Amino acid sequence: MLTKAEWRKRARLARARIDSGGTDHCDALARFLSSDAVGAGWVLGYRAMASEVDLGPLFLQSGLGPFAVTRTPEAGPRLTMHPLDSPSEPHRYGFDQPLASAPVVPDDDIAAVLVPGLAFDRLGGRLGRGKGYYDRLLARLRPETVLIGITGGYIVAELPTEPTDITMTHLAGAFGVLPVPLDDPVEDP
């Protein structure tokens, strides 16, 4: 099996060829979030980096949410969560993030998380950027929190995992939102 570093290289090459506009993703996510599949509470999303699916159209749909987004700390690995409409500032990677002084959404108030990743596998395994920010965040949340991997078009049969890796409960793509495990990879470029 390939190492995580080798998978990251492959995923970045594949993702460069994939449209990350997110319209199909957002439509599927809106249907899922408005169903009974997600309990009451905040939906944690993200503001997209260059190669990530843009969730902006989802955030604009009425009747969904409330939405929160993450803030990367100046130092240390602990992401914080803040209301989407919080005052923001530029992040060093080019997207906006909430100010450090913005109100914090408590961990226990999160009902669902829309999780970015470079790649996912059919079992819900996620390949992130390698710093562990999201795995630490997801480990803090209630066990019943719905974790939705936003595929961006790269799902493979199996990725290497470590004990600290958090598995998704669902995967979302242009194909819709499906619970894991998937019978087969649905988008394996």
Image (cartoon, rainbow, N blue to C red):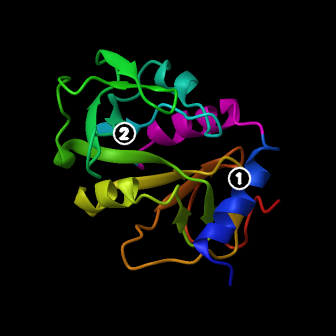
* Residue occupied by mark 2: 44
* Residue occupied by mark 1: 12
Quadrant where the N terminus is found in the figure: bottom right
- Magenta range is 19-37
32 falls in the magenta region:
yes
- Image location of residue 30, percent across then percent down: 53, 33
Identify which residue is drawn at 28% across, 62% down: 139
Residue 142, by quadrant, is: bottom left
User: Where 66 falls versus 115 (above or below)?
Assistant: above
Judge left or right: residue 137 versus residue 126: left
Judge left or right: residue 138 versus residue 158: left
Residue 56, by quadrant, is: top right
Is disc 2 surrounded by few (<14), some (14 to 19) or many (20+) residues within 10 Å? many
Which tag, 2 or 1, sits closer to the chain's start?
A: 1
Residue 23, by quadrant, is: top right
Q: Residue furthest bottom?
A: 1
User: Where 185 falls versus 177 (above or below)?
Assistant: below
- Image location of residue 81, percent across then percent down: 27, 37
Judge left or right: residue 51 versus residue 42: right
Q: Amino acid at mark 1?
A: Arg
- Nearest the eye: 2 or 113: 2
